[in-house]
Image (spheres, rainbow, N blue to C red):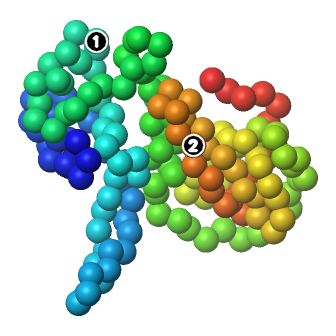
Amino acid sequence: MSRAEKKTAERLYSMGFTTYLPLQTTIKQWSDRKKKVEVPLIPGVLFVNCNELKLIRVYNVQGVHSILKLSGKFAIVRETEIHNLQLLLKDRIEIAEEGFEEIAEGEFVEVVHGPLQGIIATSIEHQRNYKIIIQFESIGRQFTVHVPRSQVRKIKDKIA
């Protein structure tokens, strides 16, 4: 359920499920104050690691509305996609500028330095920094991120 992701994750964890809730820190402003709060990167989405038989038990947990299905089957999120989400949410660090190679729009790139190291993405624009799309095909989402030129390199084929 929307806005109940953290409580739902706690309930699933207490039942023995392995869960992952990608959270990002944002600043919320009220009339009298500002506060940093953690909100889900993808509202209403919580990842559960289990087999299909155990997945049916998830429906009984308060806060679970439905389980994502694609083509009539439960959606399976690859470990590399979860890893990419974890890298995407790590704290940023500063990197000294290095030499770089030109990368055209639409080419596959791998982030080789910095907090997003290991992510494989598609280059969509480059000026001072590269703009890359990180796709999560199994859940139908994508994110656009700006990455310094020194942190990416061109790769020949997309790795599944």
Quadrant of residue 74 within the rendered picture? top left
- Taking the spot 77% from the left edge, 49% from the top edge, the residue there is 124
The residue lying at 39 percent from left, 20 percent from top is: 69
Q: Nearer the viewer, residue 135 or 120?
A: 135
User: For mark 1, what is the residue?
Assistant: 52
Q: Which mark is residue 142?
A: 2
Residue closer to the observer: 71 or 24:
71
Report if the CB atoms under discs 1 and 2 are less than 8 Å apart. no
Q: What type is the residue that disc 1 sits on?
A: Glu
Determine whether, in the image, residue 108 is placed left or right of residue 68. Answer: right
- 72 displayed left or right of 4: right
How far from the left and from the top, in percent, is residue 117? 60, 49
Residue 36: which quarter of the image?
A: bottom left
Q: What residue sits 72% from the left and 56% below the top?
A: 131
The percent coordinates of residue 106 (x first, y second) are 81, 41
Q: Is residue 60 above or below residue 37?
A: above
At x 76%, y 64%, the residue is: 129
Please say whether residue 80 is visible from this viewpoint: no
Q: Is residue 159 visible?
A: yes
Q: Nearer the viewer, residue 125 or 128?
A: 125
Task: State the quadrant of the N terminus.
Answer: top left
Q: Amino acid at mark 2?
A: Gln
